[in-house]
Each structure stands twice: as structure tokens, then as C-alpha cells.
């Protein structure tokens, strides 16, 4: 591997109806922060490259530069107007492997360039699948749902990767993701195989998809300058037989935005799911509140009647990284432990009350009031007291 | 009246007969996962999953994928092959899958060299598996189904990566679909969830063959009596077959699959898990007032706080 083989971070930008999705600027912001540090530490001049595909999108390039991109590789074609995975995957891969484009990004290493060093996608309805297919084509590693990134030189000894020897992997992207339980944080690395006995293989780009809301965009700098590079893709006629017949926005099934209060529940319902959910339903009614859930509830973990299951244990009620981000005036969490994924969906609530039997639950750290107790004991008391204090509440 | 009934029966027979001709070739790739339902799941005291004490079953998203295949079997007539990569020889996931979709063939891909693979190493095995199914059924697949994501891995990458390796058009988050047998196209509705905008429903048409990753919200619906009747018939057949599911299982090791050693398992995986740690306790972003739920005065304080919060009197 030479210095010029793998360079830059490519960030795949998402937009809808001519507007950038917030995650695009969040990814660019993080890429900028990482690369300002990277270029200082390694005395390098590697670039943050925004990859922008679509139709009638030229106006977006300047915004991307002002938010941290050094170069924008843009493909503005009617065939790219609709979100079709196959076509977008092929065009992105062509960009990644195109030497001419890399020469425009950074002429100094034009002859050596093979591929991007790192690549970022969004962990959402577009980026999850796009990152998977792009990395299947580029035959490299992908970490998903990442919420922290670090670049460092790591001393690795691994039975397969290094044959047990200690090897320093330079400029390695540490990709942090929270596992499904919400309690374990895993670091994923994409490493070359440097094992003479078993396999020698280079894997690049080191890639991930990034949870929306995990990073903060850079403030806009209208003075920032960058290059806009137009790319001419080869589009396979056969792929044009895939057609988007219609695409429309639909109102979310569960309306959280028009409620002042959201009452949520989690695994704490476990002792009597049906009874506890009914109790929560009644309590929410008394407060004119919408009902939310934590992710485990939507996974058919608990048994309840079909009516309760189909109304409450559904993905569209999930608050958190796998669901909605809300900011009601009042958020009341029953039997929710406060895993990081859930917290990211409710931390902007104005006032938070949590009810939990375990005082060590992390949810305490995001609560204004932590009421220690089991929901089945506490809810009836709260309802009685609400009646006593004669609280009448309005929706909206 | 009698004429009506006999006409109805004849139509039913005709439809059923029509459906018996296998019009489509379908594959479903499924995963054996920890059973997260109450009674089967066991947590460690620190909140993480106790894998040794938790039972395994057909993953819930895999199950929805088999339901989606069943829809095509009833509506269009189809041969279905279900495949799974697993270290467990007694794979009850395949039994449940067979019972759900009335599968005709079951495949188990089992070899020590498959272990420890990341998504791309897994996708390579399952791609070879689908190619093997095509060999077994002597016909190319029209649709390959997978679940949305695994509940224990949750990356959602394996489906699209199998699709890409097979050269199939990938349709993800599919909430409903139909096939035009004459035009040999599929029309699917997809649900796109993106942060910052309302949900999007996209309707897409693509020539067969395709790979469909089914959305968790998928539910099939048979809108005619004859379809509902044939669904019942298939379900009965499926139940009976599933009692002896083991006789339908074909097991393949790496060599039999023809999977390249360097592309599978740990050797074929670009990524490694470098470190696993407890999620660090974040800095408390609020300073919680700790109250006791059994103390009436504390309940009163809580309700007063609710009142104040809703009249926006809380100064933070």
C-alpha cells in the first residue's frame, strides 16, 4: 500500500424534493472535524468529498461546501431523480473507482489513487441499503448504526487478520455502535488481512452508516471555497426498466407532534403486560397524552391480547434512534431503563418524569423527577392524585 | 341456489388447480435467532442478553419474509425453497418457516468455516445457497425474500448484499407487492423512513427476478373467497409437512456449496469486533429529584410538577 492508494472520506449525501436531509450536514460536520485533526496529525492534505446524486440539484453543492466539503462530486441526471438502489449503487461505485475524478479532487496523487479511504452513509431508509450494496460491490467492510468515530493507529494482534502477530494498522477508523440490547457498545474495525499463511487482502474503503442525530453539523461558513466536480456516469439501459411509479409523503400513523404530553413504556411492563398497558392507556387518557414505547416492545417480546398488541406494540410508536425523535412539554417514562437509543429520541423533552423500580437505571440521568417504584403500584396513585388536584388538560 | 354453489365450487376447483401449477420460483433466506418473547429470553443482571439461557427460534423478521412468500404461493402458485445458514443441526427455524409458507424444499448451510462471518461473509454463503436452490429446483429464482434485519445483529445489510452478489434488483422495506405473471414484473410499495421528513411511500415496478427485503409492517390480505380457501388448504398441507420437516432438509457444507474459502467466515470478513464495552454512563443531562413512589407526599409533588410542566411554569 502506498500513501496515494487510499485517500479522502467520501460522504454520500441524501436529499428529498430539493432539500438536504439533516443527516447529510451532520455527516459532513463529523467528516470535517475528523479530517481537520487527521490532516494535522498526519501532515496530510486529504479531503472531505461530498457525493451528490439526483436531478436539478446543482444548487445544493454550495451549501455542502459551506458546511465542510472540500469537493462535491455531482451527478445531475433525470435518471437519478428517483431513488432506485441499483442505479445509485452503480453510479456511486463508478465515482469511487474513477481515477480522473480523484485527479480533480487532488492532483498530487492522481496516478496512485485506487479507492476512497473512508466512506460515510446515513443509517436510514435510503442509506442503509445503499451502503450495503455499494460495499458488496466494492468488497469492503461496513459497520451500521454508528454514533461515534475515531481515527487512530492501532496495535492489533488477531488470529486471522495478522496471524497472531502484532501489527500497527495506521489511520484506522474506529466505528462505535450500540448493540440491540442498548447496553453494549461495540467497536467495529475494517482491517486488511496481513496474514501470509492464510490470506493477504486490502479492504478499502472503511465504511459505516451513521445514525441521524448522532453528530452536529458545522456552522455554515459562506466564505468557504471548494471544488464542484461534474461526473458523467455510465447508466445501464436495462436498469431503466426499474421505474418509480409514485412517491408520496404520508402522515405518520401515530401523531406525537400535536400532544403536549407523551407517556411511554418499556420492559417494565413484563410482570403483567396486558394489565399494565391498559393502566398506562387509562393514565394517558387522563392526561390527554400520546403513548410511546421503547424498541424492545415493538419486537413481540411480550404477550398481550391482539387488540393491545396491534395498537401499542408497533414500530410507529417507538421513540428513539429506531423510531421517532420527539420533544413534548412533558415526557413520562414507565419501566424504561434509558438505553442510549431511547434517550436520543426523548432527551429534548422539556420536562421528564421517569418511574422505575431500579434507582440505578440510566433513565435517571435524563429525568427531572425520578419516582422510584413499580408502575403497577405508582400509576393508580398518580391517577388518584391527578383527580384530586383536578387537572384538566387540553390536547394541543 | 344449488347452481350457484356448484358454480362456486367449480370456480374454486379451477382456481385451486390453476394455483397448483408452479408459476413462480421463490427462495426465502431465514435466520435462527434468540427468542425474545417472554419466557424464552434471559437477561444478565447487567441488562445484556444471556445467550446460553435464551432459546432460539425463527427470527420474527424472517417469519414475515416467509409469510410474504406464502402470499405468492397462494395467489400465483409457486415453489418455495427456504434456506438458512446455521451452526445448529436441529434448526427449528426451518420447521416454523415450512409451516408458515408451505415450503417445498428446506436448505441448511452448515460448516465450521462459516462461523464468525460479518455480513459480507454471510452474504457470500447465502448467495451460494440460493444458487444451489436454483440447481435443486432446476430453475432460476423469480423472487428471493429476506427479513428486514435480524433482531440480534440488527445491521440489515445481509439481504441487500446477497441481492447484489446475485445480481438481483434489490427492493427493501417492502410493505406490499404483486406480480404480473404475463409481463413478468413485480410492483411493490416501499416504506421509507427518513429523519426530518414525513414517512414516504414509494411505488416501484421492476422486471423479475428481484430480491425483496420485507418491511416489519407487511401483512398479506386475500381479497377473494377462493384465495382464502386455497390459503386454508395450503396451510393444512404446510402443517402436515412441517411435522416431518427433517425429511425435507438438504444440508450442505462449504465444499458442497462450492463456496470459496477466502470469501467466507472470519477469513472473508473485512470487519472485526475490536472491543465490546458497557455503554458508558453519559453525563447526567438533568439532575433528577429522586422521589419514592410509595410516599403520598412524593406522589403529590410529582402531580404538582406535571401540572407546572404543562402550564410551562417550570423554569429550567
Image: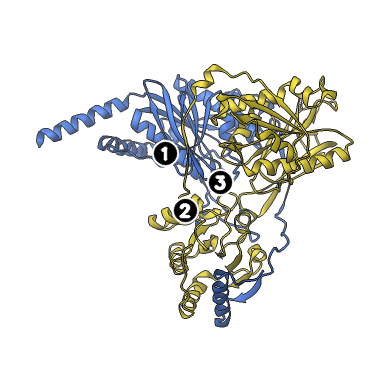
Chain colours: A yellow, B blue
Q: Place residue B110 in its image quadrant.
A: top right
Discs 3 and 2 carry the same chain letter: no
Residue name at image x 10 percent, y 35 percent: B2
Q: Residues within 10 Å of mark 2 (few under 14, many from 20)?
A: some
In the rendering, which numbered label is found on residue B67? 1
Q: Place residue B188 in its image quadrant.
A: top left
Q: Residues within 10 Å of mark 1 (few under 14, many from 20)?
A: many
Disc 3 and disc 2: Cα gap in Å?
A: 23 Å
Q: Is residue A344 visible?
A: yes
Residue name at image x 59 percent, y 29 percent: A56
Q: Residues within 10 Å of mark 3 (few under 14, many from 20)?
A: many
Where residue B160 appears, as percent x and y from the top left, is 57, 32
Q: Nearer the viewer, residue A136 or B306?
A: B306
Residue name at image x 38 percent, y 25 percent: B180
Q: Nearer the viewer, residue A366 or B146?
A: A366
In the image, is B224 to the left or to the right of A273? Answer: left
Residue that mark 3 sits on? B151
**Mark 1: secondary structure:** helix
Pointer 1 indicates a residue of which chain?
B
Disc 2 and disc 1: Cα gap in Å?
A: 25 Å
**Mark 3: secondary structure:** loop
Pointer 3 indicates a residue of which chain?
B
Residue name at image x 27 percent, y 29 percent: B16
Residue that mark 2 sits on? A254
Frontmost of labels 3 and 2 is: 2
Q: Place residue B139 in its image quadrant.
A: top left
Q: Nearer the viewer, residue A148 or A39?
A: A39
Disc 3 and disc 1: Cα gap in Å?
A: 18 Å
Amino acid at each position: 500500500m502506498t500513501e496515494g492508494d487510499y485517500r479522502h472520506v467520501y460522504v454520500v449525501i441524501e436529499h428529498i424534493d430539493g432539500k438536504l436531509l439533516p443527516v447529510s450536514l451532520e455527516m459532513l460536520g463529523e467528516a470535517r472535524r475528523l479530517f481537520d485533526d487527521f490532516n494535522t496529525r498526519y501532515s496530510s492534505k486529504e479531503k472531505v468529498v461530498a457525493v451528490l446524486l439526483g436531478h436539478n440539484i446543482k444548487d445544493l453543492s454550495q451549501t455542502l461546501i459551506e458546511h465542510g466539503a472540500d469537493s462535491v462530486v455531482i451527478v445531475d441526471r433525470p435518471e437519478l431523480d428517483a431513488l432506485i438502489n441499483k442505479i445509485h449503487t452503480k453510479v456511486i461505485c463508478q465515482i469511487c473507482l474513477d481515477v480522473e475524478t480523484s485527479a480533480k479532487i487532488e492532483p498530487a496523487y492522481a496516478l496512485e489513487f485506487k479507492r476512497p479511504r473512508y466512506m460515510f452513509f446515513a443509517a436510514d431508509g435510503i442509506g442503509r441499503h445503499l451502503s450495503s450494496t455499494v460495499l458488496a460491490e466494492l468488497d469492503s467492510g461496513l459497520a451500521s448504526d454508528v454514533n461515534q468515530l475515531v481515527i487512530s493507529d492501532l496495535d492489533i494482534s488477531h488470529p486471522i487478520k495478522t496471524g497472531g502477530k502484532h501489527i500497527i494498522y495506521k489511520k484506522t477508523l474506529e466505528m462505535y455502535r450500540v448493540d440491540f440490547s442498548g447496553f453494549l457498545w461495540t467497536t467495529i474495525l475494517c482491517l486488511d488481512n496481513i496474514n501470509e499463511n492464510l490470506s493477504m487482502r486490502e479492504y478499502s474503503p472503511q465504511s459505516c452508516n451513521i445514525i441521524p442525530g448522532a453528530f452536529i453539523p458545522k456552522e455554515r461558513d459562506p466564505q468557504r471555497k471548494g471544488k464542484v466536480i461534474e461526473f458523467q456516469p455510465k447508466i445501464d439501459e436495462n436498469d431503466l426498466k426499474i421505474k418509480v411509479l409514485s412517491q408520496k409523503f404520508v402522515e405518520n400513523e401515530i401523531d406525537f407532534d400535536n400532544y403536549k404530553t407523551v407517556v411511554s413504556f418499556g420492559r417494565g411492563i413484563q410482570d403483567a403486560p396486558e394489565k399494565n398497558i391498559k393502566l398506562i392507556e387509562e393514565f394517558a387518557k387522563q392526561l390527554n397524552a400520546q403513548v410511546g414505547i421503547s424498541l424492545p416492545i415493538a419486537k413481540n417480546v411480550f404477550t398481550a391480547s391482539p387488540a393491545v398488541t396491534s395498537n401499542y406494540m408497533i414500530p410507529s410508536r417507538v421513540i428513539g434512534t429506531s423510531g421517532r425523535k420527539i420533544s413534548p412539554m412533558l415526557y413520562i417514562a414507565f419501566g424504561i431503563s434509558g438505553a442510549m437509543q431511547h434517550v436520543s429520541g426523548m432527551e429534548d423533552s422539556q420536562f421528564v418524569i421517569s418511574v422505575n423500580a431500579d434507582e440505578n437505571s440510566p433513565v435517571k440521568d435524563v429525568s427531572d423527577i425520578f419516582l422510584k417504584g413499580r408502575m403497577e403500584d405508582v400509576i393508580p396513585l398518580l391517577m388518584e392524585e391527578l383527580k384530586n388536584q383536578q387537572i384538566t388538560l387540553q390536547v394541543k | 341456489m344449488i347452481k350457484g354453489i356448484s358454480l362456486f365450487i367449480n370456480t374454486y376447483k379451477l382456481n385451486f388447480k390453476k394455483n397448483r401449477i408452479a408459476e413462480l420460483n421463490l427462495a426465502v433466506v431465514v435466520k435462527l435467532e434468540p427468542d425474545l418473547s417472554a419466557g424464552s429470553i434471559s437477561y444478565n443482571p447487567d441488562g445484556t442478553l444471556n445467550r446460553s439461557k435464551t432459546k432460539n427460534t425463527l427470527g420474527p423478521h424472517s417469519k414475515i419474509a416467509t409469510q410474504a412468500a406464502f402470499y405468492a404461493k397462494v395467489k400465483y402458485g409457486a415453489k418455495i425453497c427456504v434456506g438458512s445458514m446455521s451452526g445448529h443441526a436441529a434448526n427449528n427455524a426451518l420447521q416454523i418457516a415450512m409451516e408458515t409458507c408451505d415450503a417445498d424444499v428446506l436448505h441448511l448451510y452448515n460448516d465450521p468455516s462459516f462461523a464468525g462471518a460479518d455480513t459480507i461473509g454471510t452474504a457470500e454463503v447465502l448467495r451460494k445457497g440460493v444458487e444451489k436452490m436454483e440447481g435443486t429446483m432446476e430453475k432460476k429464482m423469480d423472487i428471493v425474500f429476506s427479513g428486514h434485519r435480524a433482531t440480534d445483529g440488527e445491521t440489515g445489510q445481509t439481504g441487500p448484499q446477497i441481492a447484489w452478489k446475485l445480481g438481483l434488483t434489490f427492493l427493501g422495506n417492502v410493505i406490499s407487492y404483486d406480480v404480473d405473471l404475463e409481463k413478468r414484473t413485480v410492483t411493490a410499495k416501499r416504506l421509507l423512513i427518513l429523519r426530518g421528513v414525513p414517512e414516504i411511500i414509494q411505488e416501484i415496478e421492476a422486471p423479475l427476478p428481484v430480491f425483496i427485503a420485507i418491511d416489519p409492517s407487511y401483512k398479506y390480505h386475500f381479497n377473494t373467497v377462493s384465495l382464502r380457501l386455497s390459503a386454508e388448504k395450503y396451510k393444512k398441507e404446510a402443517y402436515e409437512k412441517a411435522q416431518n420437516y427433517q425429511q425435507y432438509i438438504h444440508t450442505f457444507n462449504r465444499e458442497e456449496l462450492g463456496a470459496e474459502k477466502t470469501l467466507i467466515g472470519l477469513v472473508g470478513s473485512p470487519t472485526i469486533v475490536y472491543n465490546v464495552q458497557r455503554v458508558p454512563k453519559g453525563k447526567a443531562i438533568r439532575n433528577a429529584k429522586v422521589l419514592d413512589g410509595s410516599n403520598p407526599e412524593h406522589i403529590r409533588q410529582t402531580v404538582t410538577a406535571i401540572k407546572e410542566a404543562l402550564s410551562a411554569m417550570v423554569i429550567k
